[in-house]
Amino acid sequence: MRIALIGLGKMGANMARRLLRQDIEVVGYNRSPDIVNQLAEEENLIPAESLEAAIAQLPAPRIVWLMLPAGEITEQTLQTLPGLLQPGDIVVDGGNANYHDSQRRAAALAEQQIGYVDAGTSGGVWGLDEGYCMMVGGERAHVEPLIPVLQALAPARDAGWAHVGPPGAGHFTKMIHNGIEYGMMQAYAEGFALLQGKSEFELDLGQISELWRHGSVVRSWLLDLSAGFLQQDQQLANISPYVADSGEGRWTVMESIDQGTAAPVLALALQMRFASQDDTAYANRILAKMREAFGGHAVKSE
Amino acid sequence: MRIALIGLGKMGANMARRLLRQDIEVVGYNRSPDIVNQLAEEENLIPAESLEAAIAQLPAPRIVWLMLPAGEITEQTLQTLPGLLQPGDIVVDGGNANYHDSQRRAAALAEQQIGYVDAGTSGGVWGLDEGYCMMVGGERAHVEPLIPVLQALAPARDAGWAHVGPPGAGHFTKMIHNGIEYGMMQAYAEGFALLQGKSEFELDLGQISELWRHGSVVRSWLLDLSAGFLQQDQQLANISPYVADSGEGRWTVMESIDQGTAAPVLALALQMRFASQDDTAYANRILAKMREAFGGHAVKSE
Amino acid sequence: MRIALIGLGKMGANMARRLLRQDIEVVGYNRSPDIVNQLAEEENLIPAESLEAAIAQLPAPRIVWLMLPAGEITEQTLQTLPGLLQPGDIVVDGGNANYHDSQRRAAALAEQQIGYVDAGTSGGVWGLDEGYCMMVGGERAHVEPLIPVLQALAPARDAGWAHVGPPGAGHFTKMIHNGIEYGMMQAYAEGFALLQGKSEFELDLGQISELWRHGSVVRSWLLDLSAGFLQQDQQLANISPYVADSGEGRWTVMESIDQGTAAPVLALALQMRFASQDDTAYANRILAKMREAFGGHAVKSE
Amino acid sequence: MRIALIGLGKMGANMARRLLRQDIEVVGYNRSPDIVNQLAEEENLIPAESLEAAIAQLPAPRIVWLMLPAGEITEQTLQTLPGLLQPGDIVVDGGNANYHDSQRRAAALAEQQIGYVDAGTSGGVWGLDEGYCMMVGGERAHVEPLIPVLQALAPARDAGWAHVGPPGAGHFTKMIHNGIEYGMMQAYAEGFALLQGKSEFELDLGQISELWRHGSVVRSWLLDLSAGFLQQDQQLANISPYVADSGEGRWTVMESIDQGTAAPVLALALQMRFASQDDTAYANRILAKMREAFGGHAVKSE
């Protein structure tokens, strides 16, 4: 079994390693070639100097697996690919695309009889060792040839990957997964802040998070990770309270709006990230000024 | 008609002025005597050097109106008053007490046949000119003697004051009023932040807030005030984005919890104030650290 | 001054009336002709049997004011209009379009030297008597010819309308206006629910809402309206607890997401409407089932 | 090692079983005696017919472990116990008391030199097999004698129990644990509702929840349980969408308010439960009526 893996960033490189260590042949291409050379040397990756060169080394039907940042690069690559592929070939998008884009792309490639599979992938930096959770959308005929690859990437042969629905359904499911992730993270973070705020108890958050891992209702992988860093440092004094967000948390809330399905906690978790990113806090200035205006309450000056 | 007014702070002093200008005689006492002397000179307030001295100048049945900060001072004064009063006298609490306290106090004074009236008061620094909105709780027999005072303080003889229920109902109604106020303020503040955030339109928030005052669905007194300050300065660059909160916003959410009645927006408006007050943003540090832990996402250092 | 008014629904018909009563000539067209005939008879509207016929009765430069439902009808009409108009003519969209559409439409019409003005309009069924609040986007040269119309529609000649920015800025400002409206409404509704939930006080919500109109911090036009209906019926027993939502509340939250500007209360007010619209409450079934799964808590059956 | 276990309900009975199977002697008392007799027969529990009789069978220093419903029964029992115990004895409250009560009770018992330990316990119906997670507050001298019991109840000798702080800290930590639980549950429930709401994908929520258990970021014990019931029935058509809440979720939000520490998602998760419990949805009726009042929007009748 041989596939091309396009995009060897943090996620893609580890996925290549995991595949190669399970005897899937991987032709690798990356815009900046250092990681290609490194993986060729260390892991027997078959290096390619271009997208064309990568595809040229694949047997038909070709499987081209993209691990590119969502957005322009993915779009460009998907515009280019049809010119390089043949009917019967399959493109897999393992990145974090918006599922509407995936549906559009699947339809466009279908016109040229090229298969499109969206494989939403979770697992982060831990996937190399623990395996990746993959939510796969596409037609059955396009998913079946990928099964050996999915089995190699997943935590176990028959667990951690699934064909969840038609094209787009994979990225949709991954989007909701990330929406839930936002809500869970916020729930833990608020809980830890309340523990930390009860200063007279001098609680040890490293101890408590580790404790909760064993037999409690809130045990989870996110808690495992939190216990890991809280046992090393619970002050987090040199961590900036800035919480980035990625497309999928936003898309989840947009989906809630499109459906008219209530998802208030997922929406709020996203909003709290926006608040964390906002240095000016204009809304709060307005509020302080309003209080002054009606009640004569003193306003702090900066 | 003569009453004692105990507590001549920002609110109390203006209420004394409004009463005196409408020919209600006011005996005034305040812990620090400067304002007493000033009002005696400027407005014919009858000065008193102590709580006892104030009460000594009242005809029976005595009406003692408290405009004290909620909390310890109010509690102490209400402990002292029964020793100075007679059956048939009436104590009015015009401050922002928790309605549970008001219910308890009414019951305690009733044992000595002293009336207790809780007069939740809205109007802020504008009340002197525009009148105060008063939400009055108590027994009918204790409220009726106060009517001339209520009519003088209210925006109009028969509008802006009402006897809303038994003891405690006045402060309860004022508490909910303030809870709504939090929600409304937050709604405006978020809307203004979105207007300001759309930089390519270079919107003039002074112009828009003024515009909305005329014929729009969102016109209100809070909008009138906002238009006032936004037309002078819409950058608010030297205003600290710190939003204080007072007891009543918190009590409203506790009431929601006691009742089990959903008030999610009022609860959230309060929570956003807490967030504005928090320099450390510990929850956000946890979130940033979690993202690093599972995804290798870079954390900003401080 | 003569304009064409296209769309004589609830809003459009009243706007025609207000214009005609202030001596603006209005050529009116509506898909179903009854209202055209009625206004022709009662108010001297100049009736038109088609869009073409309406435009044919206008002097150059022509002003065509659309009061159509957002969506397909507006889009179709704006596709048709260029074929009927000349360079120098002006199209006004007084409906509730998404501002991105307005920006696109302004650009498309500009290619044919036709002006486009987006006039976000608030006032509802009360506008006929009280005047409409109009938030106007467009180029100065296209807004100026409209000033007599804006002055006639607004609550006062120089208040209640404003040219707030370039094309799209009018609908943008109206969108945020409605977002704020959602938040304010939710704040009041939650407060009234807490008043009503305190059954031992037997509060009269008609009395309290009327009271708050005079001198309180929460006085507003929405409160005026609420006092109106609460004084007639505060049980609302025959009103379905279903709260519809329109495009603009949704777009406001999408704008928050696009900007990354926090608007948590506006987002939550929208989410609560979704919850009100949801008969199945699937999320709540999941929660009940989870409680059973971990705690053996009894689940209510339906 | 022998202790008394007072209260053999769902939790207490299973804890007795787990202790007895690990050779801790348990004297058991329960108000209704059936479970006492059953455990005596099946598991060698030492039956007691009264609190007094249970205590009479303990060696000094006596350890009396309460597994009673929070509230009146716990309060009564803690009022009675001092009369039955000697200095040096230890009372453990394994129920879900408010930590303020626990602090008060510890102080009261300390006056009689009786130890008080609050052992917040998580694990639900699964604890018998998987062990209980125990968050223990108290003085070191009172916790140390309990260690064999804690080790027998916990999932492992040295994991799943911890002495987290002074009296009250155990119930405090358990309270926050449950607050987080509310937030996590709500996050999952909303995510599942969005999956279910995307009807064109015909997603299998049993498949997806099972999939997410393997390698995904959102894997957790709550997800394990959800996968269990969703694989059996994902319609949940005969489950009432009523979500009960217990004291600890409410106390967590009150703690947020007391501290002034923002916990918006935990607060909102609680609010959504209130909404699920509310048949009348008065706030939504108000909203529907307001829309009618300003916009003439039709109101659904019931």
Image (spheres, coloured by chain):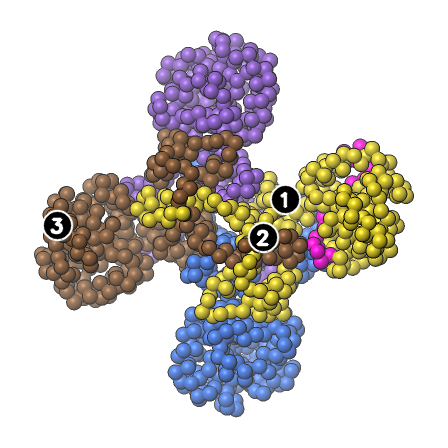
Chain colours: A brown, B yellow, C blue, D purple
Please name the residue that numbered disc 1 is placed on. Answer: B247
Callout 2 crowding tier (Cα within 10 Å): few <14, some 14–19, many ≥20: some
Residue D213 located within the stretch drawn in magenta: no
Front residue of this view, candidates B227 and A261: B227
Mark 2 to mark 1 CA distance (whole Å): 20 Å
Q: What stretch is highlighted in magenta?
A: B107-127
Front position among marks 2 and 1? 2
Name the foreground residue: B98 vs A160.
Answer: B98
In the displayed structure image, the side of residue B61 where residue A243 appears, left or right: left
Label 3 lies in what chain? Answer: A
Numbered disc 2: secondary structure = loop
Residue matched to label 3: A40
Residue B20, percent across and down? 84, 54
The answer for which chain carries disc 2 is: A
| Residue drawn at (78%, 40%) of the image | B116
- Whether callout 3 and callout 1 share a subunit is answered no
Query: In x, y percent, where is residue B172?
Result: 68, 45
Residues at marks 2 and 1, common chain?
A: no
- Look at the image and tell me whether residue D295 can be seen: no
> Within 10 Å of the Cα at label 3, are there few (<14), some (14-19), or many (20+) other Cα atoms?
some
